Amino acid sequence: MVFSSHIFLFYFLPIFLIIYYILPFTWKKFYLRNSWITISSYVFYGWLVPWYIIPMLASTIWDYVCGKIITTPGMAQWKRKAALLTAIIGDLSLLAFFKYTPLMLEAVDKLNSVFGTAGTSYAGMWNIVLPAGISFYTFVALSYTIDLYRGEAKPAPNFPSFTCFIALFPHLIAGPVIRYSSVAEQLVKRDHRIDRFVSGLGIFFLGFAKKILLANSAGQIADTVFRANGVDTPAAWWGIIAYHFQIYFDFCGYSDMAVGLARMIGIEFPKNFNAPYHSKSLNEFWKKWHISLTNFIRDYIYFPLGGNRVTVKRFYFNLILVYFLSGLWHGAKVTFIIWGLFQAVFMILERLRGDVKNSVLGNVPGWVNVIFINVVVMFSWAIFRAPSTEQGIAYWGMMLGIGDAATATPLLHATIFTWKNSVMLLVCAFFAYVSWQAHDWISEKLSATKMVIATAAFILAVIAMFTQTYNPFLYFQF
């Protein structure tokens, strides 16, 4: 189930909230309400594919058991370490099986073909389906056991509370990547106030509008270009600009909806986007884009590797490894790995200049650095979005004016360069680069005027949703 569906909006969410607020909340510190959150979250997650619940429940059980061993008073250090390794290996093995087995089977098929031993296709025989959001809840579970081992969090008081934390549906499909220590107290004691509920509703409304009105509109333009048999330079830039806005409003809109939904039940999630397209350097961009994932990688991979407190060569190796793993996290495709390494190259170039506050261009006017970083990010999105490495490299070529345009390009131009599309991308640009953001604009003490605007945007988005046949969630696949 996704947030931008009529089933969620008109059935799941109203029923969930009505029963949630009817249930008593003083008995055993939210036991009933947390249990209702858990049950509802499993219904939400397994709505279309019920077996998705099985790997998530398995991860929940073994991380909870390992957490108990890690925090048992007087437990031998080797047993604590063994429990941590068990949790890490179990979580990563589960993720690797579903996410990377298809790639390995395809590699086996190609090797068989090269050596003339092709027969049964192993990739076709093992039709492994990736459970939605597995990368997100795996990282959430990992953070719990690692933080317990480090002494940075206290163990969950009971299994229902821990299950509620893992399954909490606002962050389940596409984040943010929530750390247990940030919500532990809220699972047993939280404040339900009407002003916080209304502000959560307002953030949800604006996030929904971002997704339906902006992301979907830009996405249709991007998909038209990327699915074309061939493009020329103007079409290539038009398509990547559209995708630049689509991926931002899709993911930022989803994060806003997640924050709003959580606040409606008294739980506060951290801000996940902070105007990343305003950045003057790639280093700044990654501090503002998908902040929860960036922080996870920093705290659990980059810092343990030594961060920047190592030799210069080791530091650059750490950067390359971190961005390689970041690309691999997104999926078992070479394009994702190239995307990650592309980020690492520019991060290293900024470090070589000795200035991570500005792009590799140096101390030029701020707006020049902003434009440059947006162009760099667009080039990275091109390979990220491309169906294959060959198509991604060809797309880069067309962005640079290298290559031959397809004969069907005039027809493509007539389809994408319309007044409607031009106005739509201008609207996207306005909201992507305007100084204020939905998360900050909708404060806890929400004014009536702001709520009216948010409600009007939501109503318009709902009307649009019923007229659209195009409504993907880009990060649903991760």
Image (tube, rainbow, N blue to C red):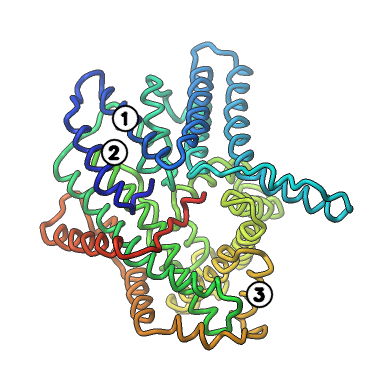
- The residue that mark 2 highlights is 267
Q: Which residue is drawn at 51% across and 71% down?
A: 373
- The residue that mark 3 highlights is 394
Relative vertical location of residue 86 with respect to residue 431 in this rendering, above or below? above
Disc with the residue nearer the chain's start (2 vs 1)? 1
* Marks 2 and 1, how far apart at CA: 8 Å
Give the structural element (helix, strand or loop) at label 2.
Answer: loop
Disc with the residue nearer the chain's start (3 vs 2)? 2
Mark 2 belongs to which amino acid?
A: Ile
For this rendering, which residue is in front, 252 or 55?
55
Relative vertical location of residue 472 with respect to residue 292 in this rendering, above or below? below
Mark 3 belongs to which amino acid?
A: Ala
User: Are circles 2 and 1 on residues that touch, CB within 8 Å?
Assistant: yes
Measuring from the top left, give residue 419's x and y in whole percent. 35, 84
Give the structural element (helix, strand or loop) at label 3.
Answer: helix
Q: Is residue 421 left or right of residue 354?
A: left
Measuring from the top left, give residue 108's x and y in whole percent. 78, 47
